Image (cartoon, grey):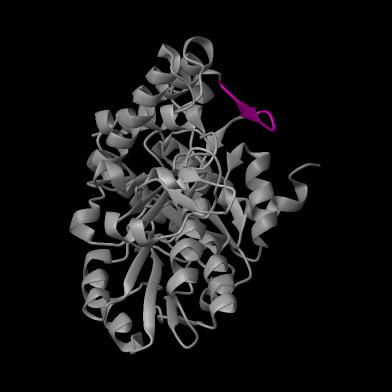
Amino acid sequence: MIDPYKIRNDFPMYRNQVKMQGHPLIWLDNASTTFKPDSVLEAVSRYYQFETANSHRGDYDLCYQIDEEILKTRKAVASFIGAETQEIVFTAGTTSSLNLVAFGYGAKYLKAGDEILLTQAEHASNVLPWFKVAEMTGAKISYVPLNQDGRLTVANLEKSINEHTKILAVAHVTNVLGYVAPIKELTKVAHAHNIIVVVDGAQSVPHIPTDVKDLDCDFLAFSGHKMLGPTGIGVLYGKFELLKRTDPFMTGGGMNAKFDMCGDVSYLEPPLKFEAGTQNIEGIIGLRAAIEYLNAVGLKEINAHEMMLKKYAVERLSMTGNATIYNPNSEAGIITFNINDVFAQDGATFLNSRGIACRSGNHCAKILLDFLKTSATIRASFYLYTTKEDIDALADAVVHGKEFLDAYF
């Protein structure tokens, strides 16, 4: 079992005893971003203090060393998700990765009358790019219905597919309700109809073991900052043959093999053809340190810890008699709720007055509002350093949630 108190010793945000509104900070917004351990900060600092150089831009030792560091990270990421090294593209984050797929693959191959399948539970990053691609190509957007709990099921996918369906783009773990989609089974059904499967892994890769070969998904996107790594670094996994067929979203230095004055251009092979310009080198190096830290702790152990906290949080919030919980049975360390008769942002502001950081609003999943039948919710999300005492503080605050008007007076 994980000892979150021991783990906190590795995180300056805890060692420095950061406070909010005069209270010790209780961080319950890990689905948004995560704290960084010493090893990640040291890796980033080491690059700036002792290793600063660009990549693939010089014939000297420092440049070569950075080239090697980037390659090591690409291999580490590939191993982390069960991919091949050449299938790992560095991006700015999940949003960047999903846009690359939408515009580099979707806009290239979709045509009028084709169909893109989404769900109501998708994050904006996995909706808006497809809206734009549909507008550009004449394809249409359709939605796989969620079941009564808010889950994506194989049965509902099978009912939604038709001869025009070309792409299925869904989250592995949804960022509001926290349900784990059966990606392997969904992919099997989709591939039987020659449908490309794009997976938003932002809320899954940091928390559960991921093997893209077992899932057989075609593309997978995730971000470093949600898994203890730096901001501004993300990953797109794509099957190599599909990456070869995908156009680069950005062009420039470092991704071309040659070009001339006549406009004759040839690109490098994936993944380099998608990495135009100077990369986020500190982010790449920091991402490897984050992966090494997570591997040392163990994703199975992290997931078990989060599930224990989720069960405990549901019990404690239910005992308050003052909370409506929207996802008591989901499998992720996310609990989405409202304080009864209190608007979500007011409730989150009240929690802030007690030093508790939760997210409120629609969490970038605006088309889920009709399903939830509420305009906004509060989301608490856990990670390996979250404690039961954090949950107790949240529940104790919820008991007094109707006092939100007095929070700052």
Query: Residue 266: x, y in percent?
Result: 44, 50
- In the rendered structure, the answer to whether residue 250 lies left or right of residue 292 reads right
Q: Name the chief secondary structure element in magenta.
A: loop
Queried whether the magenta region covers residue 18, the answer comes back as yes
The residue segment tinted magenta is 17-22
Q: Is residue 70 visible?
A: yes
Q: Is residue 378 above or below residue 87?
A: below
Q: Quadrant of residue 1?
A: top left
Query: Residue 315: x, y in percent?
Result: 38, 54
**Number of on-image labels:** 0
Residue drawn at point x = 31 percent, y = 88 percent: 159
> Which residue is farthest front?
262
Between 293 and 288, the one nearer to me in the picture: 288
Task: State the quadrant of the C terminus.
Answer: top right
Between 372 and 354, the one nearer to me in the picture: 372
Residue drawn at point x = 40 percent, y = 67 percent: 170
Q: Is residue 371 above or below residue 220?
A: below
Query: Residue 228: x, y in percent?
Result: 43, 34
Q: Is residue 149 visible?
A: no
